[in-house]
Image: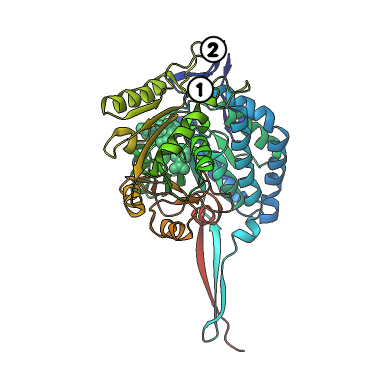
Amino acid sequence: MDTVRNYVDGAWTEPTGTDSESVVNPATKEPLAELTYSSPDDLDRAVEVGNEAFEEWRETPVEERIQPLFRFKQLLEDHQEELAETLVSEHGKTKGEAMGELRRGIENVEVACGIPTMMQGGHVSNAAPNIDETGVRTPLGTFVAVTPFNFPGMIPLWFLPYAVATGNSFVLKPSERDPLVAERMFELLDEAGFPDGVVNLVHGGADAVNELITHEGVAGVSFVGSTPVAKHVYETAAAAGKRVQAQGGAKNHVLVSDSADVDFAAEKTLSSACACAGERCLANDVVLVHESVYDEFSQRLVELADEMTVGYGLDDVDMGALITPEHEQRVRAFVEDAMEGGADLLRDGRDVTVEGYPDGNFLGPTIFGDVGEEMAISREEVFGPIVALDSYDSFDDAIARLNRSEFGNAASLFTGSGAEARTFRHDAEAGNLAVNAGTAAPMAFFHFGGRKASFFGDLHAQADDVVRFYTDETVYIERWPDQ
Ligand code: NAD
């Protein structure tokens, strides 16, 4: 079986830690690779070579720094299909979802190729008598990114292209559950021709993360994962003097107004909640529906869910597998809890069977009605294909319920009313908002929002925010007295 390798200083090496685990296909249960964790020495070396490479890389003209990114973008496109298949095999989502995820990642590479413009600072002539002032954006050193399992092809690309285009070095620690797509992307980075040490890949679990985020050679940390870990990373890395941006978990609400196109809202809501088997931080899985259209909406949602096929992501199916058996059990426990709490089970996805893959981590779309605000499926992140419906009679009350959520990642509204849309845009406390669109996923040229327990820090992933995160702006003040 293959072993997963680190990529450090332009060379592939075997991690030398003591712990290890298997990477397993969540649908077929085929073991795919063996992953050994990195030792502290492995991690030290990655940071060390990052800092050595930084000295020359920061002096490399910006036009030259983006040339490997152009090549990387082309390589990603040339290999998108093959990367998608690797992604499906280790993650469990469908091939269409994997292709879409990679497209979103490639968009970030494209945007980062605009760094010569994006990292320009400001200038004011005569800021004071005979004095000119200029803001000069400078890179800071070696940045670390720690990423989650659910978008292993896209999320590293929320960070890597911007970090290196601005002149920093970069160390990625991907999720230990599905590291193979990252490994393949680093083969493509190698081919794209970055100088040795500028981009590095290390594997490991929590210990590796804790080592990296407090390492004296690390300038800053980009993190994406669950809220408790995001909070821990934010606090620990900040206490060690690092810049930190830490994106956490979510519980996203969707409001369906009496003026909404009900069929359209049902279709988009189901795809938002069940895409990637619900393992998405942007999944809208609490659905508050105006009481006058509640029955029509919930009936339509169930009809659409009945049409969905579940199976192996490389087959022609609408929904794939959950990442691990443990996670599947956790999601099933939410279903039991909701039933015990008196929620109305409108569609039960628990008995799904997939021919040919009897042991896969499968669960079909599961829909509950009359889900009170206090229930766990209303408040906690489930990360599975479970939809929680409830009705409202006052739009303001629905917004207030959304705002009582601990999380603030995303929210959507389906409406025909401009006034409701405006209230939603002003009052909904989430960082990514969508009106008449299922999922509030920002394009790469906007930052990826997030508030409350969904984000710890100031500057988010993607676009201008991440450019500011990876640079510091020196203020340069000049006065040249007349001779
Ligand atoms: P996770 O928090 O378990 O793991 C994320 C990363 O942190 C992994 O690389 C893992 O190795 C590391 N890690 C895990 N436990 C750790 C610990 N105790 N100390 C230090 N590091 C640790 O998250 P996951 O299960 O891989 O991913 C799913 C979560 O990510 C969900 O909560 C989801 O909402 C969130 N997510 C958020 C966004 C966003 O943009 N806000 C995007 C994608 C996923």
Residue sitting at 49 percent across and 41 percent down? 145
Residue sitting at 54 percent across and 55 percent down? 467
Q: Quadrant of the N terminus?
A: top right
Secondary element at image label 1: loop
Residue 112: x %, y % from top left? 62, 51
**Left/right of residue 76 with respect to residue 20 in the rendered view:** right
The image shows residue 361, relative to residue 100, as above or below, that is: above
The image shows residue 153, relative to residue 4, as above or below, that is: below
* Residue identifier under label 1: 321
Residue type marked 2? Tyr
**Left/right of residue 29 with respect to residue 112 in the rendered view:** left
Q: Quadrant of ligand 1?
A: top left
Q: Are marks 1 and 2 in contact (CB under 8 Å)?
A: yes
Quadrant position of residue 182: top right
The image shows residue 458, relative to residue 129, as above or below, that is: above
Residue type marked 1? Ala
Residue sitting nearer the eye, 274 or 308: 308
